[in-house]
């Protein structure tokens, strides 16, 4: 258990999941978490979940700064606040975001992107002032993006958190803090899938299932899910998938199989949710010549990948997306509201739970074919 005898002006000693170097096992360690600075909050974490980016972070993506306190999806209660924080107070339930929203910079007021210039996606593993609030045995500790959710306590800049209703299901709140929202937003907000259109989703993890939900909510009538795991078929159907392709069952390419299910022309939209290098070209080729649009929302450790230029020379469009284009302050609350109204079957995402002390079991569970999301009880 974390030390709860300290005051808000003191450092807290608590447990956290830490990776010491690329390829090293994740261990649960005692770390020190300092009080928040003026624009920051310290959060007592209640629940977290595993995103594949967390696995990539143990392999050097998005940065290779160690020791690294893991986790970026989660939900918790504000324990203390800096003297300039006005958007939340002690006791508020909050979820973290990888980006902020100042509502004043060129990008925020453009209406074209969620990528705030004032509070951008941080890939240094440090706070916005390039320091850390965490340490272990005298070593500075880094985090993945804006925070470290696999920890009993964490400090995060207040511009990277969103207040949620305290009655929200904790696991569901954790899911929408990154993975599910990334997929949902890519279809619902970024691509603006048109009613009556056709869609292909490559990879049916939490991101892909979110994309299915977004496409369904926008009125897509054909939603094709592609995954080598046959057990993802029922999950996809639960979120609104109409057709399923297991490319392992055929010697034809995934894009050919998609075209066979879409009148030979391909689909109007595709979403690449895996980060598997060859699938970027396949996802683009699965769309219609001249008008097809592909959203790249999955990423692996290798950020430079081979690509068939002919796939887009034929008039197709390829676009990237961070957090599904969702603005954390003004739009993530909409998704949280839909979550509480049970407009998504988020219970289908939760397949396994572990305690923080058993974090390494979670990595093994992820390899099981029936696993979608692992929740970490803090």
Image (spheres, rainbow, N blue to C red):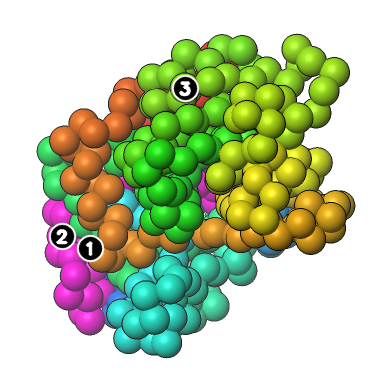
Instruction: Identify the image quadrant of residue 156.
Output: bottom left
From the viewer's perspective, is 125 left or right of 342?
Answer: right
Q: Residue beneath label 2, please?
A: 90
Q: Which residue is drawn at 54% across and 59% down?
A: 321
Q: Are marks 3 and 2 in contact (CB under 8 Å)?
A: no
Residue 221 visible to an observer of this rendering? yes
Residue 318 visible to an observer of this rendering? no
Task: Indicate whether 265 appears above or below 299.
Answer: above
Q: Quadrant of the N terminus?
A: top left
Q: Provide the secondary structure element on which disc 2 rests.
A: loop
- CA gap, disc 3 to disc 2? 45 Å
Q: Which residue is drawn at 37% across and 75% down?
A: 111
Q: Provide the secondary structure element on which disc 1 rests.
A: strand
Which of the two labelled residues, at mark 3 and mark 2, occupies the earlier sequence position?
A: 2
Label 3 crowd (10 A; few <14 / some 14-19 / many >=20): some
Q: Are marks 1 and 2 in contact (CB under 8 Å)?
A: yes
Q: Residue at x 80, y 28 (%)?
A: 253
Q: Does the magenta stretch include residue 227?
A: no
Q: Which residue is drawn at 61% across and 69% down?
A: 124
- The magenta segment: 66-92
From the viewer's perspective, is 330 left or right of 274?
Answer: left
Q: Which of 268 and 167 is in front in this view?
A: 268
- CA gap, disc 1 to disc 2? 5 Å
Q: Residue beneath label 3, please?
A: 242
Q: Is residue 71 magenta?
A: yes
Task: Indicate whether 265 appears above or below 85.
Answer: above
Disc sitting over residue 80 in the figure: 1
Q: Provide the secondary structure element on which disc 3 rests.
A: loop
Q: Nearer the viewer, residue 22 or 184?
A: 184
């Amino acid at each position: 258990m974390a030390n709860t005898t300290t005051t808000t002006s003191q450092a807290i000693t608590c447990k956290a999941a830490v990776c010491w170097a690329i390829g090293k096992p994740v261990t649960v360690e005692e770390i020190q978490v300092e009080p928040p600075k003026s624009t920051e909050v310290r959060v007592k974490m209640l629940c977290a979940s595993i995103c594949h980016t967390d696995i990539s972070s143990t392999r050097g993506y998005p940065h290779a700064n160690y020791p690294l306190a893991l986790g970026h999806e989660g939900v918790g209660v504000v324990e203390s606040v800096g003297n300039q924080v006005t958007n939340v107070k002690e006791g508020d339930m909050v979820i973290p975001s990888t980006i902020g929203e100042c509502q004043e910079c060129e990008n925020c007021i453009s209406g074209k992107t969620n990528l705030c210039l004032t509070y951008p996606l941080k890939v240094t593993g440090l706070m916005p002032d390039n320091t850390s609030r965490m340490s272990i045995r005298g070593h500075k500790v880094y985090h993945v993006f804006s925070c470290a959710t696999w920890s009993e306590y964490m400090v995060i800049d207040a511009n990277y958190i969103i207040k949620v209703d305290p009655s929200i299901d904790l696991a569901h709140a954790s899911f929408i803090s990154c993975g599910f929202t990334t997929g949902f937003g890519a279809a619902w907000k970024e691509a603006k899938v048109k009613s009556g259109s056709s869609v292909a989703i490559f990879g049916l993890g939490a991101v892909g299932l979110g994309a299915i939900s977004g496409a369904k909510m926008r009125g897509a009538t054909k939603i094709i899910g592609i995954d080598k795991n046959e057990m993802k078929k029922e999950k996809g159907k639960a979120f609104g998938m109409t057709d399923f392709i297991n490319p392992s069952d055929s010697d034809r390419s995934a894009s050919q199989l998609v075209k066979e299910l879409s009148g030979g022309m391909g689909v109007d939209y595709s979403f690449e949710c895996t980060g598997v290098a060859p699938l970027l070209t396949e996802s683009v080729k699965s769309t219609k010549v001249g008008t097809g649009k592909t959203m790249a929302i999955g990423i692996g450790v290798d950020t430079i990948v081979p690509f068939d230029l002919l796939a887009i020379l034929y008039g197709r469009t390829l676009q990237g997306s961070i957090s599904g284009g969702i603005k954390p302050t003004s739009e993530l609350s909409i998704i949280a509201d839909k979550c509480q109204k049970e407009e998504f079957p988020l219970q289908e995402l939760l397949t396994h739970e572990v305690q923080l002390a058993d974090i390494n079991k979670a990595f093994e569970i992820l390899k099981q074919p029936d696993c979608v999301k692992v929740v970490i009880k803090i």
